[in-house]
Image: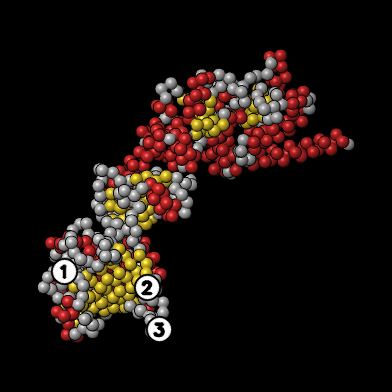
Amino acid sequence: MPTDNGDPQNQQNFQVDLGGVVDLLSRHLYSGPRVYLRELLQNAVDAVAARRDIDPDDSADHSTADSATPVIRIRPLTEAHGTADARTTFTLTDPGIGLTADEARDLLTTVGRTSKRDEFGLQRECRLGQFGIGLLSCFMVADGITMVSRSALPGTRAVQWTGFADGTFELTELTAAQTDALPVGTTTRLTPRPDERMLLTEDAVVAVAGEYGRYLPVDIVVEGVRTTHLTRRPVFAAGVDKRTRLAAGRERLGRSPFDVIDLAGPEFPGLQGVAYVLPQPQAPHMTRNHSVYVNRMLVDHGPSPLLPSWAFFVECEINSTDLSPTASREALVEDAALLDVRDHIAGRIRAWLLELGRSNPQRLREFTAVHDLALRSLCVSDAELAATVLQFLTFETTQGRLPVTDIVDIVRDSGRPLQIARGLDDFRQIAALTPPAPGPETPLVINGGYVHDTELAWLLPRLYDDIRLTTADLRASLDLLAVPPLELAGRTTALETAVTGALSEMQVRGAVRVFEPADVPAVFVTDRAAGARRDRSDARDEATGRWADILATVDRSVTAQQPDDGAGPLAVLCLNWNAPLVRQLADAGDTTVVSRTVRLLYVQALLAGRRPLGEQERAMLTDSLSDLVALSLDFTA
């Protein structure tokens, strides 16, 4: 039987600076020392696959007598440390192809060398990693590594290889009797470093091996205080029914998925996968923890380049036999194959959405209610998808939030124009001017101030041939308001003049119209040109000296470049003749009261329109209140 004591004459040095390699592995290549177990599992899986290639009917160790699945057995450190029952070393045994003495010397002492046994398959592209570098990664958690291996090649003897943290190793060829006593395969035993001992204990081994190897095509059994079978049937395997996949999604997400999408397709036979449609909304900047496997070994868990950026409403488990891992085996090489797979996955998700729209529109409406923003982003970039999904999205309009189908029906049935406001500020002003019972000439206006809504609204004429869309105009909306009766023209004209005079320093003119509701005495309407003019004026007033002169010159230049159409920037305080306060104001004979009231109405309209008050408006509010209080005191006296 093998022993731990090698012949000192067999002691040799690694053909590399072992300390430097371990430091490189732990600090720069791998994310942490826990990956030692993944590397051991990968070596074991490669060995089992190589043995199966040369002898498909091998009698490798199986979990049960009638099972065709080989078993990798792990015996972790026991928690009974320091007692007679304590297990002070970690072992992993696989029924793989094993190594000869020459192969052990070749693979385990020269970093970066691949196997020369092409006939055994260890050099094929479908095998992950390199045996030697994988075993050397164990020095991140161990002071010593002992490997006992019997090759499947007939007529060869088993070997015992022992590596030490000082950069030396011993290689011993066992006797024929010792070889006959061993099964074909490899057992690796680790003597833990004190500071990393916990990574070799039962709980840690079960967690790490279960994370990396749960879907491997071998049985993984952890034999500690309890016996734990870690391997399970992959959820992405062909033939797994939808109910089972939904249950797996519920276990993964903590909630039942909205749906599950099969990502496999005949054009990519080496790809399997499922996408769980998330049951709760996701912010666009949030990333999901996708699980990506290569040959059923976990390679990446987190944001993945395999998913298009718009697909943040799914979380995936994906396996491929064609994609290539990076040197650390913790990410994928972003090559042409990856780009092709990403396009395929994007196509599968789009196909699911299109099919849902065709077969179950109500279910799609439920989905759009959950993932509204994600779908808006998707429709902007995918015209085919927009043709099916856009009808289920909603827009904020001057008649409330409506689905696209209702917007189209309103425009078709009433003949009303369809317009889009260029921003949230314009929309709020137009909505304030829109009557509760609009006539056929009153436009139905879409709010274009939210993310993607402007781009999506302009898709409507492309999808519906009889629908026209134009940009909303604040002046036109103001012109649609009814004017007071002609016999009141003298009173209303005088009131408009009083408003313009009271707000002259704000460059705001007055207007009197009739609109609902009657409890809104005034609204302030301004376009972007007037807003920019106001900002320039504020900046000029706050500046001093040369800067004030420069800003004044800029203001004159901008004003001169504006079109001379007689309209000028739009800044109007529109008084509502339906409001009793406005009619009382028209009959007031005291110009001071009228002026102060107009200023208060102006500030009130700004606040109602959710506009910030500048320094001038705040001073105006304070002065008006002070004057009204003074007038009240004089009246009561």
Q: What residue type is labelled 3?
A: Thr
What residue is disc 2 on? 224
Which one is nearer the viewer's eye here, 57 or 418?
57
| Residue furthest front in the image | 66
Tell me residue 394's x, y (percent): 50, 34
What residue is disc 1 on? 152
Q: Determine whether the residue tagged by mark 3 lies in a helix, strand or loop.
A: loop
Residue at 51% x, 30% y: name it.
Answer: 446
Residue at 53% x, 25% y: name it.
Answer: 444
Total numbered labels placed on residues in the image: 3
Which one is nearer the viewer's eye here, 577 or 236?
236
Is 459 on the left-hand or right-hand side of 123? right
Residue 24 appears in the figure: no
Q: In which quarter of the image is residue 197?
A: bottom left
| Residue furthest top in the image | 487
The figure's colour scheme reads secondary structure
Q: Determine whether the residue tagged by mark 2 lies in a helix, strand or loop.
A: loop
Is 447 on the left-hand or right-hand side of 352? right
Give the vertical position of 283 relative to 502 (above or below).
Answer: below
Density class for disc 1 (Cα within 10 Å; few <14, some 14-19, many ≥20) is many
Residue at 36% x, 42% y: name it.
Answer: 349
Is 356 on the left-hand or right-hand side of 567? left
Q: Which amino acid does label 1 sit on?
A: Ala
Tell me residue 204's x, y (percent): 39, 69
Q: Distance between the residues labelled 3 and 2?
A: 15 Å
| Residue furthest left in the image | 155
